[in-house]
Structures are given as C-alpha cells and as structure tokens.
Image (spheres, rainbow, N blue to C red):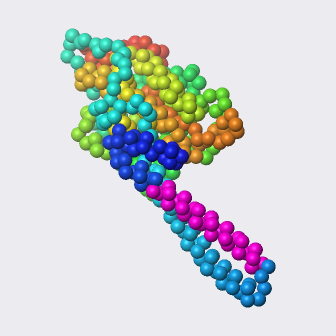
Amino acid sequence: MIDLKLLRDDPEALRSSQRARGADPSAVDALLAADERRREAVGRADTLRGEQRQLGKKIGKARGDERDSLLAHGKELASAVKAAEVEQGEADQALTDAQRALPNLIIDGVPEGGEDDFVVLDHVGTPREFDFDVRDHVELLEGLKALDSERGAKVSGARFFFLTGIGAQLQLAMLTLAMNKAVAAGFTMMIPPVLVKPEIMEGTGFLGAHAAEVYRLRDDDLYLVGTSEVPLAGYHSDEILDLESGPKRYAGWSTCFRREAGSYGKDTRGIIRVHQFDKIEMFSYCRPEDAADEHQRLLAWEREMLAAVEVPYRVIDVAAGDLGASAARKFDCEAWVPSQQRYRELTSTSNCTTFQARRLNTRYRDADGRNQIAATLNGTLATTRWIVAIVENHQQPDGSVVVPEQLRPYLGKDVLYPS
C-alpha cells in the first residue's frame, strides 16, 4: 500500500513508476482524487460533529421557545451528521480501494520494460561442455526411479507428480542443507500454516494481477499459499516489532501451491512449472533505511546456496513490468539448464519496502519512541525446481548423477545410479 504522504508530496514519482511498469499512470490521479475526497469528507463530518457538541451545550442551558428551536435544529444537525458519516465511510472505502489498486513504487535504477528487459548483473560459473547426448531432467529422474509423473497425473491431474525413492531423498537433502545454512546465518526456522485468511493474502499483494494463480477454498474462505512469504508476512501483522538490534529474520519450510493460470502449454514436461512444490523461503523485517542492504544480504545467501549445489548461474535485475505488485526491486538467480540451453529461474529475492507492512499494520518503534512502518523482504533459498538444475548439470554418460559435495552428508551417496 502506497504511503499517502509520498503520494501528496511527489505524485510524479508514482506516475513514473507506473509508466516503467507498463501500467496506467492515471491510477495515481485516481488515488489523489480519492485522497482529496476523503479529507473533505472527514473535515465536513468533524465540523458537523463539533457543531453538534456545541449545540448540545446550548440546549442544556436553554428554556422555553429557545430550547424547542434548538432541539429542532438538533434533529436537522443529527441528520446532517449521519449523512456526513455515511459519506466519510464511502470515501474511506474508495480511498482504500484506490490505494490497493496501485502497485509499489519501484526503486531508482530498476530497468524499465517487461519480462525480456532485465539487466544481467553477474555470471557465475561456466556452462559445462558435454561430449555425450544430454538427457533432460525427466529422463534422468525416471532412470533413477526418482520421479513418477504418470501416476501424479492419474492421482491429481496435470502438473502434479510423485518424487519417489532417491528423488524424495534428494529434495529432503537439499532443503535440509538450505535450512541449516539459514539457521547458521541467524534465521529462525519456521514451519508455517499453508492456509491463510483473505486479509493476509490480500495484505501481501497476491490478490491483484496474480489472483488467478492462487488456490481458494471458498467453503472455508481460506487460500492455499504459493510461498511461505505470505504466512510469514502475516506473522507480525498488527504488531510493533523491536528492531533495535537489527532485522528480524525467518526461514519458512512449506509446501506451496500455484494454479499456474495462463501457463498452458508452457513447461508441461517435468517439474519446472507445477501446481505443488516445496520451498525454503527467507523473510526479513527491517527498518526502511536498512532494506537495500538487507536485500543484498538475502541475495548473498542465495548465491551461497547455489554455490553449494555447484551449478552455473546468472543474476538479473528484473524489469519493472515483470515485478509483482508488492516488489520495489527484485533480483533473480537463474541456473543454466543444459537440455534447454538457457538459464531458468531458481531464486528470487524482493525488496517490498513498506508496501506489505503498511497493509498488514506491522510497525516498529524508532529511536525517538515513535511507531513507524517496517520494511519487508523475501528470498528463495531452495525449492523443488532446483532438482532440475542439479541433475542436468551433474549428469554422466550412463545416466548417473554426481552428487554435489555439500549434499553428500545429507544424502549418504556420492553418485546416484540408474536402477
């Protein structure tokens, strides 16, 4: 949710942000108009209530005809107050709707444009040269008896799967490694609920342009989360945090659900774009002035985890038009996928500034004892999709897969052999 002070002080910054996103800048003007309407409505209602209080004092002292006249005026004033309060309520709702319709203000330096307009910030590692025919992850995993997509579809439908045997062990090893790294870095481990209330899903900004990707249980009025960012953002809603000693960091381990609406025909083979997966998600609360540095720290922890699984990757600065509503800036780490001869996203880390915390009323007390809106950030530390990059980059001519060194203690194997 946009800060109204920022809106009043610098509406052009918000219009520029909208243009960079490829969104309609007139949404800013609509919010300005809604803000002005509400202020006028509040002013009118306050004035009338003040008159009503003064009239009440006069009525208490009046007698005879004067009292009758004042009582008659009091009825008229009461009706006017009621009408003004209705108008104020409508103006409040209109302002809230206009605020929620506007995505976050992007940070200076974010590339303009859409999905293909990202800027590459770094390349790490060199894609391997293979002297044999490369297998894709589905062929490799099926050879290892690690994946059963056919029975996943039989049981649950398209884009569902079973990780079986060594496949399930590989995911558990990878996620455990990621969580151990997070805990060693000072994160509090969390296993959050994966069903959340509408106000929490709305508060994180996932019920806007991407609402079609969210599973909803209408009978219970609950949503299935697509990332533990959602329950972790709601964890401190309506609270005042102590950030005196630095950011408050959580690492959530959860199963995630996405409808993948609009992705029909894309990545239908394998486990790249699926409806259910597991993930370790970092989430941080900090002071707004610390958010940019915290964003770099989250990216560094993602890089450390990618180094642990020994895959080549690049870091991109995501363009404004490809940001979610809550993100003011996002960095993706994309791993090289040999069978596709392209980089594919493995991690994202987003700086959401005060956008989510303003919606969820998450505050902290500053050095002067005043309550301020906190900043929130999130970042992926490992997820099911990583298995694709791991097995494809470490495959051998016979269909076996060399296990990255840091995973070996968790998996108990140096090499995974076809069975």
**Left or right of 92: which side holds 317?**
left
Tell me the quarter of the picture where residue 74 sits: bottom right
- Residue 365: x and y in percent read 66, 38
Residue 39 on the magenta span = yes
Q: Does residue 110 appear in this view?
A: yes
Q: Residue sitting at 56 percent across and 31 percent down?
A: 289
- Please state which of residues 131 and 282 is positioned toward the viewer in this rendering: 282
Q: Is residue 355 magenta?
A: no
Looking at the picture, tell me which residue is in the foreground, 256 or 202: 202
Name which residue lies at 63% across and 66% down.
47
Q: Residue at x 57, y 27 (%)?
A: 187
Residue 211: in sight, yes or no? no
- Kindly indicate the quadrant of the structure image that contains residue 371: top right
In the visual, does 61 lie left or right of 30? right
Instruction: Describe residue 30's horizontal placement relative to residue 40 as left or right.
Output: left
Within the image, what quadrant is residue 213 found in?
top left
Residue 145 or 277: which is nearer the viewer?
277
Name the residue at 74% across, 84% down. 67
Examine the residues drawn in magenta and state their main secondary structure. helix
Q: Is residue 28 left or right of residue 250?
A: left
Please, is residue 366 above or below residue 299 in the view?
below
Question: Image quadrant for the C terminus?
Answer: top left
Residue 243 drawn at (x, y percent): 64, 33
Name the foreground residue: 1 vs 44. 44
- The location of residue 140, given as percent across then percent down, is 28, 22
Residue 389, percent across and down?
33, 22
Question: Which segment is the magenta one?
Answer: 33-60
